Image: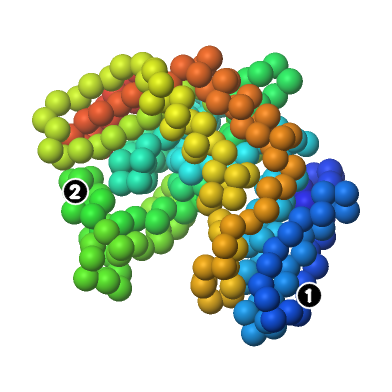
Amino acid sequence: MGLNTHNQVEAIKISGLINYIQDEITSVTFDSDNRCLSVKGPLELFVEGRALYFLSEYMSECLQASYTNSLLIHAAAVYSKEKDRSYLILGEKGSGKTTLSFRLCQELGLSLIGNDLVRIGYDENGELFTKEGSRWFDVRETAVKADDYMNKLATILSAKSANSWNNKTRILPEDHSIETHFEQSKIDKILNIRIDPYQNYFSVSPWEGVQRNLILHEKIGRHISGQATPFQDDQGNYLGSLPSINRDKASLVRDNIVKCMVNTGITELFGPDSKALATWFKEEVL
């Protein structure tokens, strides 16, 4: 299996192999000399290929990191054609990344790079860039209820669960006149946000300190540490942990990205709604 940066026009930089062996006992190991991920277990657990696909994604991310100096992270990112720059939006689950990125794209005319997964990296000059992402919006029912701007989406929400947090609807950018962007673009600003309807004021400040370092170290390295994807079968049954792959080199890429982010500076934005954050972005960034 050839591994690259998910851009099919680029030359393959490294290859790897997944080998499935039918066995009564499940296990997964990695042979670094042959770059081979060996999966053992009953055929009925892996016959559909879903589990092997996710394992290939994990191996790809770990192996290619040191060749592309880039990693997939959980974040949102938008792009300004006028400034030819991208903007990275960080935050915890439920902090409002989807709400803000949707509003920036629809209201201010920015293009969506990714909302949930974004590939970021650094070039030979140590400058951060974005390069592709998940180009759709998975909107929670709670987000629609919590923000006036998102209320317009209420009529298209699905209701698969009684728990509004678990009700998510995929919204395609083209259905809302939003453009997408997938080319490598220099990051102009990094934001760490939280939209909280119970907070009655807007605040902006540099994100600094030990907590920032701990969060960045964990989040930037999730997809190469095996923390984002466990060893599981086609039905999603948990089987254990995945082996480390190319850990030293991939971790060095993570470390360099975190250092670049710290050197670039991260702005922390807290506000009661997306309007406060979007207004600040329009006045201070664009």
User: Which sits in the foreground, 219 or 164?
Assistant: 219
User: Residue 118 at what x, y percent from top left?
Assistant: 54, 42
Q: Is residue 6 visible?
A: no
Point 16% across, 40% down: residue: 197
- Residue 146, disc: 2
Q: Where is 64 relative to 69, above or below? A: below
**Residue beneath disc 1:** 21
Q: Based on the displayed image, in which of its 4 quarters is residue 160 positioned?
A: bottom left
Q: Is 109 placed above or below 209 here? A: below
Residue 193 screen position, x and y as percent:
33, 32
Q: Residue furthest bottom?
A: 44
**What amino acid does circle 2 point to?**
Ala
Residue at image point 53% right, 51% down: 228
Q: Which residue is at 68% across, 67% downward?
A: 27
Camera-near label (2 vs 1) is 1
Residue 23 quadrant? bottom right
Where in the figure is residue 174, as x and y percent of width and height?
46, 55
How packed is label 1: few (under 14 Cα within 10 Å), some, or many (20 or more)? some
On screen, residue 46 above or below 273: below
Residue 94, how many percent across, how many down? 31, 46
Question: What residue do we see at 88% from left, 49% from top?
Answer: 33
Q: Indicate the secondary structure of the residue bearing disc 2.
A: helix
